[in-house]
Image (spheres, helix red, strand yellow):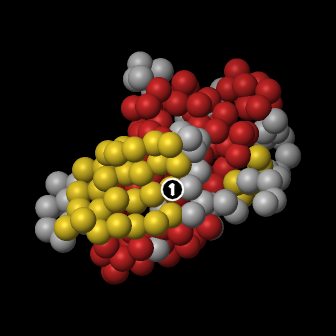
Amino acid sequence: MAEKVVFENTMESVLQVLERPIPPEQIAGLDALGIDLSKPLLPAYSVETHAALIDFVVRQRWPELPPEEGQFEAGRAFIDIYTQTQMGRAIKGLVKTIGPHRALERMNRTFRTANNFTETRLLQLGPATFELWFNFVSRPGYYRGLVYQTLFHSGVPELEVTQSSRQGDEVTYRVVWRP
C-alpha cells in the first residue's frame, strides 16, 4: 500500500484550531514538525506529521486536560472549523439532510476527503445504537471527537460516542443517541 497521507485541506483545518495570530513560539514548534507556514502547505503530509500536529494543538489549546480528552476537544474543534470550508459546508448540509444513521454509513467517503487510508465499517445494534470500526486511528480521542461533532451537527439528541475496543491501530466506537 502507498504511504498513508493526510491531505492539505485537513492539515489546514487542524492548524485553524490554534489561536490567531499564531504566536512566534508556536510557529517555531510547527517548523520543528515540518510544517513551514511561510510557504503554502504541501498537498499531503505523512500520518505521523498529522498525529504530531494533533498532539501539538492539544498541548497548546488544552494543556490542562488529559491527552485523550484534549484530543476529543481538538476533534470537535476541527469539525466546527472544517464546516466553515466549502467542502465542510457541503458535508454539514448533507449530514443534516440525511440524518445520523446515513451519515455514519458515509464515513468511509467522508474520511477519504481527508486522507488516503481510512476505512470504516458500521454495525447497527439498535435503532440508535451503532458500532463504528476504523482500520487506522492514530489518536483515538481525536477520532471520537470527529465522530461526535459530525453527528452533533446532524441534530441528534443526547449523543454519546465512546471507544468500545482497540486492537493495534484499529478502533471501534459505540455511538448512541436518543431516537
Q: What residue type is labelled 1?
A: Phe
Q: Considering the numbered disc 1 on the image, is that residue within a helix, a strand or a loop?
A: strand
Image side of residue 10 versus residue 103, left or right: right
Query: Residue 145 location, x and y as percent?
Result: 41, 47
Name the image quarter holding residue 126. bottom left
23 lies above or below 98 = above
Q: Residue at x 56, y 55 (%)?
A: 135
Labels in figure, total: 1
Image side of residue 95 versus residue 124, left or right: right
* Residue that protrudes farthest toward the bottom in the picture: 97
For the residue pair 128 and 96, the one nearer the viewer reads as 128
Image side of residue 8 versus residue 65, left or right: right
Query: Residue 77 location, x and y as percent?
Result: 45, 46
Name the image quarter holding residue 112. bottom right
Residue located beneath label 1 in the image: 134
Query: Residue 148 location, x and y as percent?
Result: 35, 53
Query: Residue 104 location, x and y as percent?
Result: 39, 68
Quarter in which the N terminus is drawn:
bottom right
Quarter in which the C terminus is drawn:
bottom left
Q: Is residue 128 visible?
A: yes
